[in-house]
Amino acid sequence: MNIDQLAEWFQQQRIVEVTCLVPDLTGIARGKSMTAALFLDGVKNEQLRIPEIVYTINVQGEVVYNDHVSRTERDLVLKPDLSTLHLVDWNADPTACFICDTYTDKGNPFDLAPRQILKNVVGLFEKKGLKPIVGPEIEFYLIAKFDDVILEPKAPDGRSGLREFGQHIYSLDAVDEFDGLFEEIYHHCEKQGIKLDTLIHEDGLCQFEVNLRHGDATDVADQLYLFKRLARQVAQRHGVFVTFMAKPYSEESGSSIHLHQSVVDITTGTNIFSDDDGNDTEEFQHYIGGLQHHLSAVMPLLAPYTNSYNRFEAYMSAPTNTHWSRENRTVGFRVPESSRHARRVENRIAGADVNPYLAIAASLLCGYIGMVEKTAPRPEFVGEGFEERGQALPESLAEAVDNLEASTAIRKVLGDAFVDTYVAVKRSEYNARSRVLNPWDIRYLMVNV
């Protein structure tokens, strides 16, 4: 669709308002809204702009300045990706929405933008005639609305009026308690081009998981980004909150995004992870080797907050190491049973709290470096991975950020500007979190020390 066709479509749909979405480093939707006429004029004349600090805002909403982004706050050219056009029908007026990329005045993509980071990584594969394919599974909790941020969350009442308790893993009756909410989510997903597949109840209180159909890495990241936004909107319309926090309950399993990854030859469409006889190829082994070898350096992109590391607890449905194994959900990298065409590796380490663009980029980059450098994986792990602490994950955000800052291999691809800025943002969040008086301090320190 070109700009003239878009103008005609606006008239047909009676579009009143247009929203330009910009994914920031946290995955929060930033951007601006305007009239349809102003949008069309801005696109034609490249007059849509947004300050570069949109990419240096931490999760608290504070701008973090550094050597790469100064207080001058230069403007970037905002270019909507017309292929991401979708309707937002929860607004009062007919609203069109686009995901946007940003460029400098010289026409260069802005390399702090998470969507551009993912495009850069995908471009590495394309230069070798390859295309990464990603299929995500994302977990989340429904929680009762609250206005006291000190209290722990609690499960909401279902349509029966009862609050969920105990474990209801794979329970269809538990899903039916919120069937109106999920029906509306599926409705909006269809409107927004989000290819939602299955829905299940996980083992936490009102914890659910949805699968998105596998596809192009950037397109899948767009869908995850839009899904998280619309799920929050729909949940609020039904009187509840949805949380993608990695560990909202101390005694319940955390929420993750499992990233199924494969690589195909662009020319033939053949999955390069399996040969004609269905055996694993060297590329597949090297991809896993790259994940194992470089994952500790990209952990802040897969586990971006202090809370993220609470999820990595043995016997709580989350991996604690970077072992790989076939049909084994206790390790970091699982190889599901599949046909040769569907041969893939499932990265089970990323939390649901990630920016999907950065998490997918990080995982793909590790595998890519492994293939290029022909990194051999460690032997397949046999047994229950929770019992094996070897090759453990970083234990804290502080440790993970130090690893990212020191990694020359990751800097070489993602660039100094991105790494330095991301590290600065994460440290600002970590320092702010460390200064907060929390319930543990009050309970154990206030009158005892």
Image: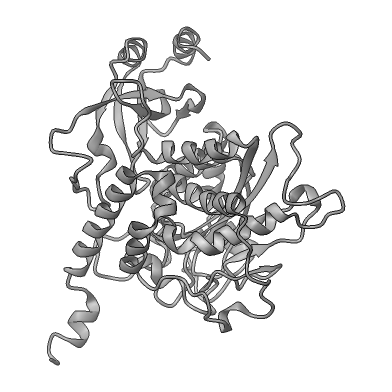
Give the farthest residue toward the right.
Answer: 277
Q: At 51% across and 70% down in the image, what residue appears?
A: 204
Q: At 46% across and 57% down in the image, what residue appears?
A: 352
Where residue 406 sits: x, y (%)? 35, 59
Q: Is the residue 135 above or below the residue 350 in the image?
A: above
Is residue 6 at all visible to an observer of this figure? yes
Q: At 62% across and 60% down in the image, what residue appears?
A: 288
Q: Is the residue 407 above or below the residue 125 in the image?
A: below
Is residue 248 at all visible to an observer of this figure? no
Where residue 66 sits: x, y (%)? 19, 46
* Image colouring: one colour
Q: Is the residue 31 above or below the residue 176 in the image?
A: above
> In the picture provided, is 262 more to the left or to the right than 274?
left
Where residue 43 sits: x, y (%)? 36, 15
Viewer-side residue, 393 vs 125: 125
Viewer-side residue, 207 vs 117: 117
Q: At 77% across and 56% down in the image, what residue appears?
A: 338
Quadrant occupied by the C terminus: bottom left
Q: Is the residue 73 above or below the residue 224 in the image?
A: above
Give the farthest residue toward the front.
Answer: 373
Where residue 147 sits: x, y (%)? 25, 60
Viewer-side residue, 113 vs 2: 113
Number of marks drawn: 0
> In the picture provided, is 406 more to the left or to the right than 296?
left
